[in-house]
Image (tube, grey):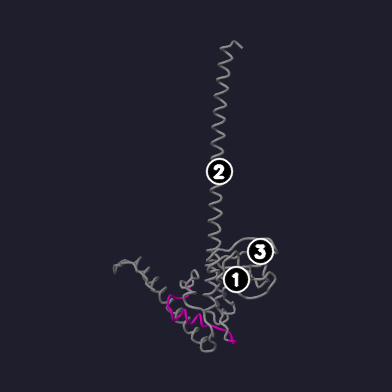
């Protein structure tokens, strides 16, 4: 990771303090990265995935390399994480159109990212919303430890490419748990932010429409006043 530090003079006390702050941050990150690699090595030696997900797939997940690492070797070790049955904690799946990804009422421990394709969320036969790439879903159920509140299925004529993360992966150590929680927090925040932007655009459109209507009303009122004056003048001319 490249870190750009300010150009400091020896007598610049304020910026010397800033330099120490940056140096402390770098040391802290280096220490955390060292601990992460140590945890990954220990976990890989204990259990390794028979069919690990490709590193290129992990790179498609927003914030993944930001939270963990840009280093391919580190990402490979994360992909190799597995349970006692050597089943990978992180899996890539292709769902056929209409195939259920999440079933309403199920109790399970998986967070999902739609990488490509289309998916919809429904309750019974009623569509609640659609999921667009690249978006996480299923995170609230995992955090609240409750049953799935809706069904998610691949939608329309295309396959849905999905990355699944078994949340048991966070039990491999505090360093992994902290980072996966950070990943989930960033992804959820980003999803809420995007939804807010859409709502903000809709709100702006509504305000523009209201302003346009208000201007037209003012124009009609002005025209009406002109007609009243013309009517008064006409009455005076006619002696009415």
Residue 72 falls left or right of residue 92 = left
Q: Which numbered marker is on residue 122?
A: 3
In front: mark 3 or mark 1? 1
CA gap between label 3 and label 1 equals 17 Å
* Residue indicated by mark 1: 96
Quarter of the image with the C terminus is top right
In front: mark 3 or mark 2? 3
How crowded pointer 2 is (Cα within 10 Å; few <14, some 14-19, many 20+) is rated as: few
- Expressed as whole percent of the image width and height from the top left, the position of residue 204 reads 53, 48
The reply to whether discs 3 and 1 touch (Cβ–Cβ < 8 Å) is: no
- Expressed as whole percent of the image width and height from the top left, the position of residue 198 reads 54, 55
CA gap between label 1 and label 2 equals 42 Å
* Residue indicated by mark 2: 209
Q: Earlier in the sequence, mark 3 or mark 1?
A: 1
Q: Which numbered marker is on residue 117?
A: none
Magenta part of the chain: 67-85
Residue 217 falls left or right of residue 68 = right
The reply to whether discs 1 and 2 touch (Cβ–Cβ < 8 Å) is: no
């Amino acid at each position: 990771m490249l870190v750009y530090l300010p150009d400091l003079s020896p007598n610049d006390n304020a910026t010397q303090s800033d330099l120490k702050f940056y140096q402390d941050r770098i040391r802290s990150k280096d220490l955390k990265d060292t601990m992460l690699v140590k945890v990954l090595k220990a976990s890989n030696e204990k259990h390794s995935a028979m069919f690990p997900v490709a590193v290129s797939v992990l790179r498609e997940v927003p914030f993944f390399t930001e939270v963990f690492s840009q280093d391919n070797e580190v990402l490979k070790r994360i992909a190799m994480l597995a349970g006692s049955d050597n089943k990978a904690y992180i899996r890539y799946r292709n769902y056929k159109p209409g195939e259920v990804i999440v079933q309403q009422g199920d109790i399970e421990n998986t967070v999902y990212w739609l990488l490509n394709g289309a998916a919809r969320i429904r309750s019974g036969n009623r569509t609640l919303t659609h999921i667009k790439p690249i978006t996480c879903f299923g995170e609230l159920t995992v955090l609240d430890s409750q049953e799935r509140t809706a069904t998610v299925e691949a939608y329309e004529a295309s396959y849905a490419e999905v990355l699944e993360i078994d949340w048991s992966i966070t039990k491999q150590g505090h360093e992994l748990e902290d980072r996966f929680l950070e990943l989930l927090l960033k992804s959820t925040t980003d999803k809420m932010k995007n939804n807010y932007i859409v709502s903000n655009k809709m709100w702006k459109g509504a305000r523009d429409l209201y302003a346009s209507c208000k201007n037209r009303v003012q124009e009609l009122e002005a025209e009406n006043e002109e007609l009243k004056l013309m009517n008064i003048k006409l009455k005076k001319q006619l002696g009415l």
